[in-house]
Image: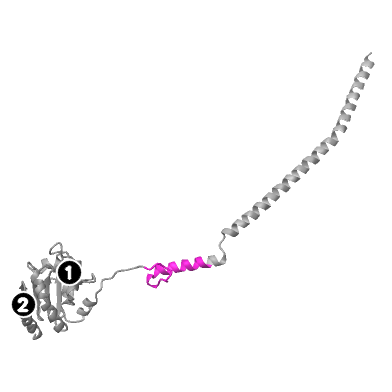
Amino acid sequence: MKRLTILGLSLVFIFILAFTLQQQLSTSPKTESSLTSSQQIASETEQSVSEQATADNNEHSDNESETTPTVADSNKNNEATTELATYNSNPDQTTQELPMIETTLETTTIAEMAQEKNLINTDLPETVIIDQNNQKYSLYRLLDRPTIINVWASWCPPCREEMPYFQKQYDLHHEDIQFVMLNATLSRPSETEEAAKEYLKEFNYTMPIYYDLGFNNQVKLETAILPYTIVVHADGSFDRYPGQMSEEQLIEIIDGLLAE
């Protein structure tokens, strides 16, 4: 009985072993096929990734060719940089391509000419006047020879009456005597530079005309009434003539200055 039991168990073990081997043999082709399929998928995936990487590289190269400066662009940038550096280091030597910088310099031609000569040493206060081109000058720097300073206004009847006398004497003696015809600008609200210029143009006056700057001269020269004439002699002394001057009086003054 015991032997039969051992034999039965042995048969059962053998049967199970045989069945297991049969199952393994039947599933091995599937495993191999599955493995082969997996390898194929992996290979295809790798090829797809490689193709995508190649496409990305080509696109990146195209973008670089569009954005990377060419040799000509580089040379142009270098020229612009050099030109800008030249402008910054020496603005006076800028090229025409660079924006021009406009500057307004005070004209000092008359003042420079006066400095080359012996200016009259006078006690008159140094003031600032403006010519018809809006250029500023020092009144003192104009005193390079005997000078007649006449303060006038276009609204002033006595001024208008004596203006032809001064024009005539200027035409005759402007090389020997300095004439400074100083407009009493804003002596009235209507007395503007424009109003004075219209008056001068109407009567064709060509004397050197100057304009006061903020009552600077009218106050410092103490011209309380109009017209007002100051005569500066060669020795620096000066005489004041308030009010209207006759033609005979002006001629007498001129003769005295020419005799100095």
On residue 258, which mark appears? Answer: none
Numbered disc 2: secondary structure: loop
Is residue 97 shown in magenta?
A: yes
Name the residue rendered at 76%, 42% in the picture. Answer: 41
Is residue 230 shown in magenta?
A: no
Residue 245 as seen in the image, left or right of residue 138: left
Q: Is residue 227 at all visible to an observer of this figure?
A: no
Magenta-highlighted stretch: main secondary structure? Answer: helix
Disc 1 packing (10 Å; few <14; some 14–19; many ≥20): many
Q: Is residue 220 at all visible to an observer of this figure?
A: yes
Q: Which residues are magenta?
A: 75-100
Please tell me in which quadrant of the rendered image residue 177 appears.
Answer: bottom left
The residue closer to the viewer here, 111 or 223, is 223
Residue located farthest toward the top when viewing the structure as drawn: 1
The residue closer to the viewer here, 180 or 243, is 243
The location of residue 213, given as percent across then percent down, is 17, 66
Q: Which residue is mark 2?
A: 246
At label 2, which amino acid type do we have? Ser
